[in-house]
Amino acid sequence: WALSGRSDERPPLYLHLLPRLHLCDERTRPRHHAEPSARLWRCRLLLERQRVDGGVEHTPCQTIGVMMLKPNVSKNEIVYFVGDITTLAVDAIVNAANCRLLGGGGVDGAIHRAAGRDLLAECRTLGGCETGAAKITKGYRLPARYVIHTVGPVYSGSASDAELLRSCYWNSLDLARAHELHTIAFPAISTGVYGYPKEAAAEIAIVTIREWFDEHPDAGVRVTIVSFSAQDDAIYQNIQRALR
Ligand code: ADP
């Protein structure tokens, strides 16, 4: 990560790595349409613990200052975040949507509530989405610039479940790349009301993302895997350790 105080760069869309970011009085949140800001960003950063794939641990710290963060765009990596995906100022958050793309419960409902009604209006123009496929909209009032809507399988126990779940991750990453997005956050697709066993789903998520990275070594994508609870995060950490 490069830190710089330059004033002519994009808003800090990569600050999702610093969870619980509070911006001082100059503004409240990055806007998805914002042009590169001509003013310095005065940020009060409250950092919480985060883990980086590979086992590096960052301890909590606190700092106040003016800084811009730039991702290391030559490197693909997975990081883990525990909390609400709608708070992340990444290029795109992924929505575990349903086929109609008209909102619902769980993470889908949270994303629509945070993005506002304009998101639903754009979703209505998309004609739905097949299971395993992905479609993109703007992020509207979210700190994320875009939302990638993907439809996970309803768990049935059949062999196609895993393939469809894998397609969700793969197609979302392909779509992000097609739009030149470099930071993307995934919830645990299908593991809520769609009933996919969490361990199996976590393994598919990590393996698929790693295989996509292998196929696109120069993509420069940072994937944030979001768990809504510490227990769900522990599942990812166990899988990640087992796969290493
Ligand atoms: P699905 O229908 O694909 O199962 P759900 O929204 O029911 O989707 O659940 C998917 C996952 O998203 C679950 O693990 C749930 O705990 C998690 N989740 C729910 N709300 C949020 C949120 N605001 N941020 C991140 N993850 C969330």
Image (cartoon, rainbow, N blue to C red):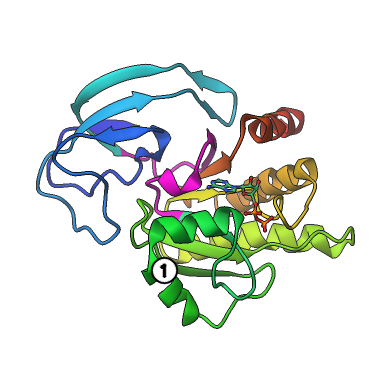
Q: Quadrant of residue 128?
A: bottom right
In which quadrant of the rendered image does the N terminus lie? Answer: top left
Residue 39's place in the image compared with 158, above or below, is: above
In this picture, residue 24 sits left or right of residue 176: left
In this picture, residue 162 sits left or right of residue 112: right
Find numbered disc 1 in the image and state the secondary structure of the residue it sits on.
Answer: helix
Nearer-the-camera pick, 233 or 103 = 103
The residue shown at (48%, 80%) is 124
Q: Is residue 183 magenta?
A: no
- Measured as percent of width and height from the top left, residue 29 is found at 26, 46
Residue 181's place in the image compared with 88, above or below, is: below
In this picture, residue 15 sits left or right of residue 165: left
Where does the magenta region start and end?
70-92
Residue that extends furthest to the left in the rendered view of this protein: 38
- Measured as percent of width and height from the top left, residue 105 is found at 60, 59
- Measured as percent of width and height from the top left, residue 213 is found at 58, 49
Query: Are there few (<14), some (14-19), or many (20+) residues within 10 Å of tag 1?
Result: many
In which quadrant of the rendered image does the C terminus lie? Answer: top right
Which residue is under mark 1? 119
